[in-house]
Every structure is written in C-alpha cells, then in structure tokens.
Image: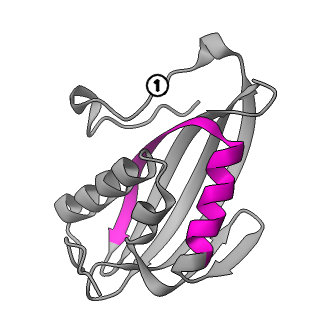
Amino acid sequence: MTARPPFPPFTRETAALKVQAAEDAWNTRDPRRVALAYTEDSVWRNRDTFLTGRAAIVEFLTRKWQRERDYALRKDLWAYDGNRIAVRFQYESRDADGRWWRSYGNELWEFDEHGLMSRREASIDDVPIEEEERRIHGPRPESERGRPLPLQ
C-alpha cells in the first residue's frame, strides 16, 4: 500500500491540495496512475455505473478516455469534513463524431487513514457546446490554480 498525503482529517488547505492533485492526475488520462489514488477495494458510482476495486477503475477509465477525446478537467473544492471532501467539476471532451461536450458534476469522496480514496460518488450532466465555446484547454496552468469555476 502506498500512502497518499495529505491525510484526513482535512483542513481547507489540505482538502484543496487533495482536489488539485486529483485534477492533475485525471488530466494525465492515465488510468493506472489515476487508480493508484484509490484503495484496492474502492467503491464507485459514476453516473449510472457502479464498480469496485482498482482493476475495475482502470478498465472504466480506459473506456472513458477512448470515448471522451481531448478530455480536460477542472475541479473545485466545495466542502470538507474529517475524511470527506465534496467537489464540483467541469470537463470538456470531444466524441468520435467530433462533437464537443462540457460535462458538469459533483463528487463525494471518502478517504482512509492513508489518504487513499475508498469511496467516490459522481453525478454528471453533459451539455453540447460548439468548439469556439470551449474554455478548458488541457491541464490547468499555474496562473489559474485556486480560481473558482464559473457556473456555466
């Protein structure tokens, strides 16, 4: 097992670090790297999909990023308490037909004492956008870190 600081209980500062670390990892689009932040038996709900364990997470993310091309994500700390963090997020991606989408969502995270996520619940809505409406282009530049996400 590999520990993933910061560890709970979270403060505003450590929760924000955890959120930025998750955003950075997901923007790599590397399923194996992302999965290492979760416990071996992590439980997920992603939209209407339920899965358990790192192997299932890797399979899920592999399929996700094959469908969601040019995926780029922004996460924003919403709330924290003890070993839990709530996040809102937006990401943009392009489908196989070249159509652009912006996806809005909320996640509820729960962590073990080693800083690994043991539970993730994500609710996500997709909105079609025109390419010229895009505002998320790759990983967040250092100059934009800590800025809140716009509502729409």
Residue 148 relative to residue 18: left or right: right
Relative to residue 117, is residue 128 depicted above or below? above
Picture quarter containing residue 51? Answer: bottom right
Residue 81's spot in the image, x, y percent? 33, 75
Relative to residue 113, is residue 18 depicted above or below? above
Stretch in magenta? 56-80
**Type of the residue with mark 1:** His
Which residue is more in the foreground, 146 or 66?
A: 66
Residue drawn at point x = 66 percent, y = 53 percent: 64
Count of numbered tags:
1
Under tag 1, what secondary structure?
loop
Residue drawn at point x = 26 percent, y = 37 percent: 145
Residue 24's spot in the image, x, y percent? 34, 48
Which residue is more in the foreground, 16 or 24?
A: 24
Picture quarter containing residue 39? Answer: bottom left
Picture quarter containing residue 146? Answer: top left
